[in-house]
Image (spheres, grey):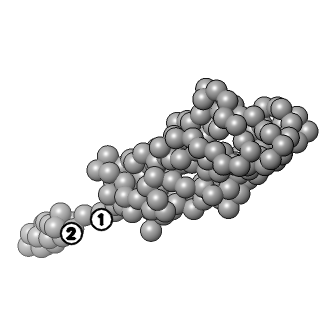
Amino acid sequence: MRLTIRSVAAATLACLAIFLPPCEADPVVKIDLITNANLGFGQLVATTTSGTVTVSPSGGRSTSGGVVLGSSAGVSAAAFTVTGHPLLAYSITLPSSCSLSGGGSSMNVDTFTTNPSQSGVLGSDGTQAMTLGAKLHVAAMQPKAVYSGTYTVVVNYN
């Protein structure tokens, strides 16, 4: 009889282990931003009057003030791929400004804009394309040089 009781107890314990619900988890995938193309303002000519050059998120370029547009080679909106957990919403934080330096001089970049604007939703594959444009401030008689700099864009889940 002791054998039977132990067998039943062992069988009961085995059944309990089998019928306990499995432990499940759905970890959120880290959100990331992959750079596909850099922001480029192209060639421009500074005159005796200051001005601005704007590149839109669609890649269009426009000018105001005393800046004359040169070759459009190198003109580009920045392009990114946002990656993360499918179908989650995220917010975009843009810099207020950054500085481009070259030839011992500098220029300010501000008015950053994106498409999508301020927030987005990742697709069913966990990605979404994002483009970025900004405004470059050119001083009167800005020295000729190749200017470069960096800026930070942050994406976070909502």
Tell me residue 46's x, y (percent): 78, 38
Task: Indicate the secondary structure of the residue bearing disc 2.
Answer: loop
Q: In this view, does 27 lie to the left or right of 1?
A: right
- Residue 138 position (above or below residue 10): above
The tag on residue 23 is: 1
Residue at horizontal 60 percent and vertical 55 percent from the top: 112
Mark 1 closeness class: few <14, some 14–19, many ≥20 residues within 10 Å: few
- Residue 4 position (above or below residue 80): below
The Cα atoms of the two marked residues, 1 and 2, are separated by 9 Å
Task: Indicate the secondary structure of the residue bearing disc 1.
Answer: loop
Front-most of residues 68 and 149? 68
- Residue 83 position (above or below residue 2): above
Tell me residue 100's x, y (percent): 77, 44
Residue at horizontal 57 percent and vertical 62 percent from the top: 93
Residue at horizontal 32 percent and vertical 51 percent from the top: 123
Is residue 11 at all visible to an observer of this figure?
Answer: yes
Front-most of residues 52 and 149? 52
Front-most of residues 124 and 16? 124
**Quadrant hosting residue 66:** top right
Q: Name the residue under label 2.
A: 20
- Residue 120 position (above or below residue 141): below
Tell me residue 126's x, y (percent): 36, 49
Front-most of residues 103 and 66? 66
Residue at horizontal 80 percent and vertical 47 percent from the top: 49
Give the residue type at disc 2.
Leu
The quarter of the image holding the N terminus is bottom left
**Quadrant hosting residue 5:** bottom left
Mark 2 closeness class: few <14, some 14–19, many ≥20 residues within 10 Å: few
The quarter of the image holding the C terminus is bottom left
Q: In this view, does 116 lie to the left or right of 13?
A: right
Give the residue type at disc 1.
Cys
Is residue 78 at all visible to an observer of this figure?
Answer: no
